[in-house]
Amino acid sequence: MLFQVQYYQNTREYYENLKTQSDEFHLVQSASFVQFLKDQGVTNVMGYKSFTKKLFPKWYGAYTDLYLSSKIRAFIRQNVSSLEEAKVYEQNIQEIIESFRFVVELHMTRLPIFSDTQRSFQFFSKLVEELKHDSIVKECLTELTSISKATIAARIRVQPLHKVYVHHFDYIDAPRMMLLHLLQQLGIEIVLCVPFHAKKTELFSSWKTIYETVSQTTYDTWTCMNQSETGNGSRFASYLDRAIQPENDGVNMRMMNFAYPTTFKDYVDKNVTSLNQAILAVYDEDLNIYTGRSKTKHFYVTTYGKFLLSLSACRKTSTGIQLTYQNFVNMMTSGWVRSGNVLGEQALSLLVDLREYMEGVGTFQDILERLYALTELQEVSDTFDEVAKMQTDRNRLKKYVTNPFRAFSYVHRDRYDITVKQLIDCTKDLARKVNRLLLGEQETRNVVTYLGDLQKIYESVKDAWSDAAREKFERLFSSEMMLQMEFGKEEMFQFLTLVLGKEPNPEDTEQKIYNFDQLIGLSLSKEELHITGLSLNTFPWKSPQVPKFVNHSWLKKCVQHTFTMRNKEKRLHALLVDYQSRQSARATALYSLYHSLAYTKSQVTLSYIENLQEKDAPSIYLSVLQELYGKEIEHVDEAVDFLFEEPEMNEEKPDVSPLQQVPDLIWLDKDFCYRKFFITAAIEQHPVYEREFHQQQVFSTISTLLSEQGDGIEEVQETIFPLFPQWTQALKQNLVETNQVSGLRSYKSYENVYYPKAMHNIQKLWSRYEVTRRYQVKNQYKNDTFQAKEHLKELQNHIRETYIPAEKGHHCRMCPYLHVCTEGEYPVDERD
């Protein structure tokens, strides 16, 4: 018999009465089970992950995977000639690392290639051969193979160490099995402790399959340590195993269905408040973030973290730094940019307005060229203002009628906290920093050197940072982070992500949502258990696959051709146990659900969340349990916490007499919508267009009118077209040729300021007049017969002090205020 197997029929009773010796060590599968055993007074206990990290600190070091990733990426780029194939391998580097760890922990560093070995396995075999000669990998291999019993005892602080109890492992893959073989080989007695019942083999089928394979014995040779039984969960047990008769099943079960993730969040916030309650889910990370139960916040979610996050998305090529405009905005406003006393954050509002002006930029050079063009556009606008300065003074409305360029949002310097020239200086500062920190595709850099460059840049901007951000970021520069390793771009950013995501003093996270792998321990330690996300796609969970770049058949063949009989048997045995564990996943999942019913002290809640995952539905086992226990499913719909109420109208009519001074050009808006007119006349004083669609119409109108003088369209193409580099030459030409505006020399006047009558095309753009709508102002504007009193009276009859009516229609798409209008009509609304 390879290993001794002991079993118990009542899990709770067995562990609550567990007696231990000082020379024993207890190994369990999950952190929750560790805590449960510690609560029972067991001292020498550890979870599997913590145990292996103690034994092999280099191999399981925090940065070992990063180092392997860097070496694997370099190998791919040097040895894979096909760009397409290399790209696929690079996208699967994490799977390659998992495969490498799998074979190394099997102590297999020689993988023969056979005539039928598939191409990806051949690549992996050559990679393993290359990596095993790397100096750092060699140190890890030595660590894995040369450990002694005394070293193990010292690292886990159990001396003397004679026996290791392995508790409740429902999954044993090949690396775990090889570790058990190693411990036994070093003279440590291994005892496997599992739940089992000799008369309920179907219910315990996964345990029977796995541990008969592990021990290479039949279950009738195992030792029974506890013979009492629990009645709870027996109805479900009888469904899984017909040999079982349900009796004394007092499970307190609740079944729920949440209409949306938001309803689940509301329920959790209001009802799961005690430390004696626990929630479990397959998608635990997503739900923790969504419900706000994740206490720790990564540095990247802060303003300052956006710089590194966006930096990682850029590319350094022979032609320069390639980046998107969104990444540029994120980095500029992240707190990392400073030019003199000007901070990059001050540019946010200007950068937002420039989104469409910057359409198509891909490098810093592109961005700078656009900004230089923008300064020229502002200078042209300034020229118009300067010419009419004596007549307009500081009157915004007069400036507008004499300078049509003021219809463009980005010529208004008073809208922003930064000038375009200051933004150019900040852009140059950002470009220098990105060029310094961004590694090229084939470039590697020592971690210490890289952190030194990063620290110099940080020192230049940290004064404007918050204290919390400074404290978190400066952990990067502690001595323990000074790794003497060289990383490429991808691994360097993974290193930064890993370090900046650590919490030196983690907050209490008892209220978080746990993964299903914590179910066994939590059901023993908590009063109430809520298992959610039970869907067709998640429960029972699918059999886990072996790492992508190996399979059982190939590894078995490699063992047969590589090792001597004694070493061969251990590895073949480990592979067989691995196969059986993976195949037993479904039965393991069903037993885990039974365990939660049988051993949770108070109440078990089972639930499904609709609209959490696409193409999903409730697990069939929710229906099974509903039928077995006669429970009704509680449907929780979206909670309505507020009601919309119509505002009470103030019947008092406002004084509109100040609008008598508004020129008829602005009154054109009243033909379409009272609200649009009021915002323009009383608040903005003239339209300012931020959307590209509107700006193109303004551009075409200005260009068409200006082409009526001087050298015509040729002069416009030479002087005006370059001011709008975001559009192609063909598009600009087409905009002008299709515009039917004319009448540059037909003037109107407003308080002794003369302006082209054609300005109405900029005021209303291409708003379409409907036969059933008003068009009085249009006719009076055209015939110079505007009657202000008549329109003031009409306006006073339609508006109130607290409400200005909006009239939706086709004209809404020409309105610069559509995005803030609650009653406006978007083009998509017209289809309804």
Image (cartoon, grey):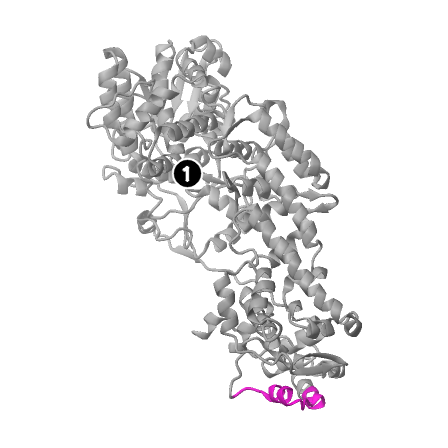
Highlighted magenta segment, given as a residue range: 772-793
Q: Find the residue positioned furthest to the left.
A: 115
**Residue at the outermost front position:** 711
In the figure, is residue 349 to the left or right of 234?
right
Q: Nearer the viewer, residue 426 or 377?
A: 377
Q: Pick the quarter of the image with the C terminus.
A: bottom left
Q: Nearer the viewer, residue 173 or 313?
A: 313
Q: Residue 822: horizontal and vertical position, in percent? A: 57, 71
Residue drawn at (20%, 28%), measured in percent from left and top?
A: 116
Q: Give, as a three-letter code, the residue at label 1.
A: Phe
Q: Is residue 521 above or below residue 268?
A: above
At horizontal 69% and vertical 52% (from top left) the residue drawn is: 421
> Does 454 sit above or below residue 717?
above
Query: Is the residue marked by circle 1 packed among few (<14), some (14-19), or many (20+) residues within 10 Å?
Result: some
Q: Which residue in the structure is indicated by mark 1?
A: 516
Q: Is residue 232 visible?
A: no
